[in-house]
Amino acid sequence: CGSGQWYGPVVDGVELLMTPFDAVKAGDVVVDYSTPIIIGNTLEDKLIDIGRHADATKLRDVMHTELAETYGTEAVEKALQLYPLSIFSDYARGLFPSDWSPAYWAARVMGADRDFTCLSRSVAKQWHRKGGQAYWYSWMQPQVFSSKSLRSLRKASDANDAKQGAGSCYPCPGAGHGADLAFLFENPSKVDVKGKVIQGSDLTDRLQAFYVNFVWSVNETAEVDVANSSEAGTTRLNIHLPSWHQFDPSLGNAMRFVAGESSEVVHYREQECEFWDSHPKVAR
């Protein structure tokens, strides 16, 4: 990730005629929609870094580069309206550390929505359309870094302040790419949320239970509270979980994972994804 190298399925025209995502979009018969899936990503999965002191002007310039040539300046203005900087300065500051500016966070979330969140949503919609089950999620809990690592992240982001356009990052602050892995595999030094390991450990329990219960059951994971479970790894885990239903396009429901507040929400990022669905990324 840090070197910016691409990796993924290679369309060779023989064994693989199209990318998995294109196959899903097309409703191709090679896709087994009868297999239930969990699909989602982190809130700031995009590895873009426009500098930690970036302001509204630089954000506008970056978005102009991303959108204007293909979709016009009106698309740029609409995108900026959908992501007002007040969200990142006044709301949920625990999700957007103040060492990085609101414009920085806006760029990260916008990029993640376009390239990850809304694509995951479209896959979940296609699974539903084909009669399958898809469970959509958004990982919102920021990754925990040591003081030394945070200094390195700030220094790298400072270097991107001087760039006219956007740079890149990895690892990245916030709920960046792979931020959920420390919780999934319970790395004690990286689940110390707000100085309370117990909060991070509880989030780990819920995340692990959702995955294990999903594997061992084709039923919805709503209100799971198994009183008599056998040995770990052979049955559903005895963890009380919030409701998480299969994706329904009419509800736009998704599970948001965040320490102490994980819950299923409806119409998640609906306006944002409707915009990005009509303004997808175009290779330049």
Image (cartoon, helix red, strand yellow):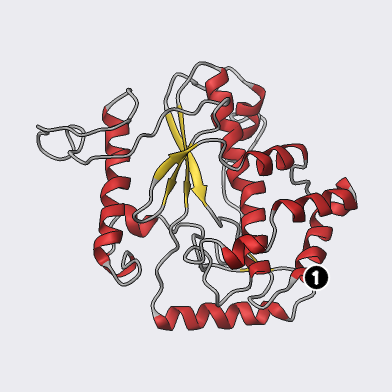
Q: Quick check: 100 above or below 74?
A: below
Find residue 51 and report its image quarter.
bottom right
In this picture, residue 277 sits left or right of residue 174: right
In this picture, residue 122 sits left or right of residue 146: right
Q: Is residue 195 visible?
A: yes
Say which residue appears at 58% left-offset and 44% top-offset.
117
Say which residue appears at 28% left-offset and 32% top-offset.
223
Q: Position of residue 231 (x, y in %)?
A: 10, 38
Asked whether 65 or 7 is in front, the reply is: 65
- Assess disc 1: are there few (<14), some (14-19) or many (≥20) residues with their C-alpha within 10 Å of its C-alpha: few
Q: Position of residue 126 (x, y in %)?
A: 58, 25
Q: Quick check: 109 above or below 189?
A: above
In this picture, residue 155 sits left or right of residue 202: right
Q: Position of residue 161 (x, y in %)?
A: 70, 79
Residue type indicated by callout 1: Thr
Count of number-bearing discs: 1
- Residue lying at the far front in this picture: please name it: 90
Asked whether 273 or 167 is in front, the reply is: 273
Find residue 106 and report its image quarter.
bottom right
Quadrant into which the N terminus falls: bottom right
Q: Is residue 69 visible?
A: no
Find residue 230 and report its image quarter.
top left
Which element type, helix, strand or loop, lies under badge 1?
helix
Q: Quick check: 179 above or below 125?
A: below
Q: Which residue is mark 1?
A: 57
Say which residue appears at 32% left-offset and 30% top-offset.
222
Q: Position of residue 87 (x, y in %)?
A: 62, 60
